Amino acid sequence: MMSNHDEQFEATHTEGSKMGIDLVGKTVKNKQIIFKGYIDGSPMENDMELKLGDGLKLEVPKGSNAIVVKNLYLSCDPYMRGRMLDFRGSYIPPFTPGSAIEGFGVSKVVDSDDPNFKRGDLVSGITNWEEYSLIHKTDQLRKIEQDDGIPLSYHVGLLGVYTPLAYSVCDPKKGDYVYVSAASGAVGQLVGQLAKLHGCYVVGSAGTSKKVELLKDKLGYFPEGIDIYFDNVGGAMLDAALANMRIHGRVAVCGMVSQTNRTDTQTFLNMFSVISKRVTIKGFLQSDFVHLYARFLEDITGWYKQRKIVYIEDMNNGLESAPAAFVGLFSGKNVGKQVICVASE
Amino acid sequence: MMSNHDEQFEATHTEGSKMGIDLVGKTVKNKQIIFKGYIDGSPMENDMELKLGDGLKLEVPKGSNAIVVKNLYLSCDPYMRGRMLDFRGSYIPPFTPGSAIEGFGVSKVVDSDDPNFKRGDLVSGITNWEEYSLIHKTDQLRKIEQDDGIPLSYHVGLLGVYTPLAYSVCDPKKGDYVYVSAASGAVGQLVGQLAKLHGCYVVGSAGTSKKVELLKDKLGYFPEGIDIYFDNVGGAMLDAALANMRIHGRVAVCGMVSQTNRTDTQTFLNMFSVISKRVTIKGFLQSDFVHLYARFLEDITGWYKQRKIVYIEDMNNGLESAPAAFVGLFSGKNVGKQVICVASE
């Protein structure tokens, strides 16, 4: 659908459609990032490998209801480590060794047998770490109405599936003291800004070596304690926060990036604070907030355009750069949301 | 206030009043349990000592607004260990070394300078571990309307200050799977019964050696996981429960009796379940439920008289028995609410 009052959008869209049409039926050497096998500890670059596919014909079989897409932007997310472990009891199944890594992305439709999508459409959703993907599960895809005010890559970041967490949890009130760990990350950066919009006093920590020290040396930051801790880190950071919670304080646990394995032990000195301060610790998954997504999208888009919030991306260029970028998440290498640009259109 | 339709009550009350009057002005060798000094680990009997006081005159000075009471029943509660530690950052200050231990009790008024209490009245509230106490902070006392259907000692147990926790937290729904640790204890025994009244399926654990094993070997108990875990224990038990929570399960943390010190480390293998199962862990203190006490009292008294709930006490006789009874709480020696009978009237 074109927008008459937006020439640039129209131009891009037309070109994109042409591109889609041009490629249909061609066979491409499809570059892929392959998941080699299950891991035990922190992911390393050589747990993945770049492979040139045998040749993918960019055409969907009739009756398949599938689509073929060209991947533009891929999202690097900490939760993906969980899929590298040989553990089937989680909310999402593990990766398949020998296959391309699965993840969120923004893609352009090259060919479609699904009546909901046509050639040239832009979509976000689960795709693979490769140049072109054949997607059968099209019901999880969302069509993107392109908007020049919003970079396309933001559809895996600012407007992606995780940021609604920042928007929905904790119920911040004016004057609350809010602490955010991994505050420059994909979700953390938005938590801090949204809390500020609510009139909270916000402190964030980022970087690896100074995190816990920053919080422990909290005088001047939170002399009166913390009302809300938005936890992206777990472990020692969560423990340090517990020691500093105010009465009836709330901890939203949205990530535990400090944990190498889901069964790593986490040792707490301050768990008793849960009783003495009547703290609530609550875990969240983005999938619980799907019903809020439409409202979230409208609010966040508006706030972004009004410059009430900013969003920082850490953009790597080229599919080849994906393994290093992903591994970097776990040593705090990224500043902002980690995205891979596979192709810009 | 006497009850015409209840002769036994009238007789007891009259005798009590006489007793009160008889003792006024007398000087008694007041037996006391003295707190010797701050401890580091588990409490031991010789952290306390029995002392014969120098002689207490059973009379309140005019204008003091105080009362003198004869203590009848004393409550042994795990929270009291926290008051034996030299830590002032908690919700309740530490005990004073060299002074009698402070705790909840049921007492009879011997003399009163407070217009709200008269000789012979029965009261519950904070008193001392001794035969007779001079109480200045009378505003924390609650006058007991004696009722033959309810044993007096129940005013530190079934109708005491902790059981409202069992009544108020967790919001059980029909069909929920509820697990209670320390399920034969003062609060735990009521949690299980109230959950059953709500139509929940309830499993409790009690005893020391078998607790975690019971839960780990959960097949047949909770093959589908736990909706509500009422935690009186903390540590390894909380960890084991986390591994078995259902999605959106709730953990009410009301005690951590497994922890010797408030700063003992607690190590968790399953903290990630908080995210993957979106579990809520919330701490509770009885003081947050004071506003519900009147309704609680009415409901619980009714249910007890209708035999919908039972209540088990572990009654020790004599003030001398108090240190051993208290220490026994931390090795799971008690079966039911631990009470000391100092005098029956």
Image (cartoon, coloured by chain):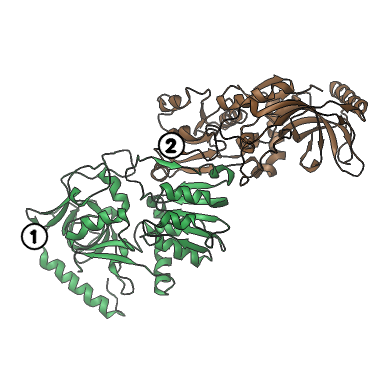
Chain colours: A brown, B green
User: Residue at 39% of width from left, 43% of height from top?
Assistant: A272
Q: Nearer the viewer, residue B281 or A46?
A: A46
Q: Quadrant of the N terminus of chain A?
A: top right
Q: Are marks 1 and 2 in contact (CB under 8 Å)?
A: no
What count of labels does the image hold? 2
B211 or B107, which lies in front?
A: B211
| Res A309 visible | no
A120 over B40 or under it: above or below: above
The answer for how far apart the CA atoms under marks 1 and 2 are is 48 Å
Q: Chain of mark 1?
A: B
Mark 1: few/some/many CA within 10 Å (<14, 14-19, 20+):
some
- Tell me where residue B129 sits by quadrant: bottom left
Q: Which residue is mark 2?
A: A245
Secondary structure type for disc 1: strand
Q: Residue A131: horizontal and vertical position, in percent? A: 79, 27
Residue A283 % position (x, y): 55, 42
Asked if B262 appears above or below A314 in the picture, the reply is: below
Query: Is residue B208 visible from the viewing direction of this image?
Result: yes
Residue B28, numbered label: 1
Which three-letter amino acid code belongs to the residue tagged 1?
A: Val
Comparing marks 1 and 2, which lies closer to the viewer? 2
